[in-house]
Image: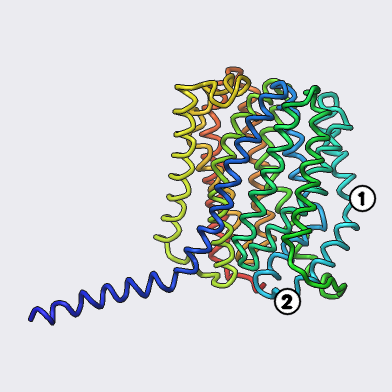
Amino acid sequence: MTEARGIPQRRTFARIGTFVAERRGLVRDYFSAISGAGGRLVFSLAYFIALANSLSISEFGMFATASAAGVMLSRILAFGFISALYRTATIRPNLIGTFTAGFLLLGVVSLPLLALASFGVYLIFFAGTVPLSVFSAIVFAEALLWRPVEVALIVNNGLGKFGRAAVLAILATALRAVGAVLFMASAQHSIWAWSWFYIGANAASLLLAFGWFYPRQRPRLRTALYLRRLADSIYVAGAEVLFYLQSEFDKLLVLAIGGPHLAGIYAIIMRLVDLTAIPIRTFSMMLVQRMMRAPDLLSRLAVKSGIEGGVFVVSTLALLALGIVLHFFPNALGRNVSEAAPLVALAICVPGLRNLVEYQAELLFARGQTAVRALNLGLLAALKALLLTYVLATIADMSKLVLSLNIVFLMLYLASMLLTYSALRRPAKAI
């Protein structure tokens, strides 16, 4: 009788052992990838502290806003063909050399459009506030130096080489931190001087990425192959531009409406919010890869709600911990940051809601629904512009403004949830 009762128990342990064994590789890959996110988090914080306390608050606001615009504009590079390169690395790694050649070709072809779009963004948001030479230098560093580093990271992650990608992420972020520390130690602390340090740090990262970390495959041009992928890539590029527009539009509006000093305070708060997204993006990246191979992965409501709840809780706890530290030690991140320290905890729900909107956009990319993704992001960008314009025009007090961001991002999340999960009911597209 005792032996009979022991059989179900042994079967239960056997099932648990099988479950763990089958996912051992996934767990190992996740910890390899999250180690890169952890390293990036440490060096990103060092970079932020050095830079935010070297530039004046106004110039930090100018740089942060120009950098956000540069990140958005960098998605035009190669007309979004990076997405095709990522899918190739994930599914057909033997074609990486061929698609790398396509990325380089389309990258050169896209340069006039990138330059034209950059000048248009400058005229709309930065003319009269940021010198054109500084804006051009920052966009050059983001679009032509840092974006290719991201390509190397994306390809390594697509190949499942999460350890190599983690090392590259840490080293590249460390080079930026070194650049900021050297700038702090220099005699000149203007935004123009910093733009040269920034170019140097990103150029060093680019040499490192392609000199040591990019897969060695001979580039082969196959124009017909690229043309078949170009329409999807353009959808992705448009969606990425719209995603970063809706993600960073608040910085542009604060600079345009509130001026450089207010933009600097706001940029400090949002940069601290951004740091909470680094571990979440690692999880989203791995989930996207799984969904490329198994599009119905999130078909159950319990799985969807469990993941979203986890993303929100982790993001919120991260900002709460930072807010508590800054409440008791306002100078912990430096003199300039201390001015924004009392406001950080007021944005308590912003990281979780913001990270969820980003996560939901990645779900559509994973299922090949790139046109719907672009449309959704365009709608969210327009909604965010309306909400933030109203908030900035009606609320003068900075504390109330930051507090109101929780409502703004809640409305964006609800709109994103409605749009995303409506689209996920449709069949996934073949990749």
Q: Nearer the viewer, mark 2 or mark 1?
A: 2
Report which quarter residue 57 is drawn in: top right
Per the image, the residue denoted by label 1 is 112
Per the image, the residue denoted by label 2 is 94
Front one among 393 and 210? 210
Q: Position of residue 195 (x, y in %)?
A: 81, 34
Residue type, numbered disc 2: Asn
Work out whether 359 lies above or below 133. Answer: below
User: Which residue does the image show at 73% across and 76% down from the upper left?
Assistant: 94
Q: Position of residue 32 (x, y in %)?
A: 54, 59
- Residue that lies at the very extreme toward the left in this rendered image: 1
Front one among 155 and 136? 155
User: Which residue does the image show at 83% across and 28% down from the upper left?
Assistant: 192
Say few, some or many: other residues with alpha carbon within 10 Å of mark 1 (under 14 / 14 to 19 / 20 or more).
few
Q: Position of residue 216 (x, y in %)?
A: 77, 69
Work out whether 262 lies above or below 164. Answer: above
Say few, some or many: other residues with alpha carbon within 10 Å of mark 2 (under 14 / 14 to 19 / 20 or more).
few
Label 2 element class: helix
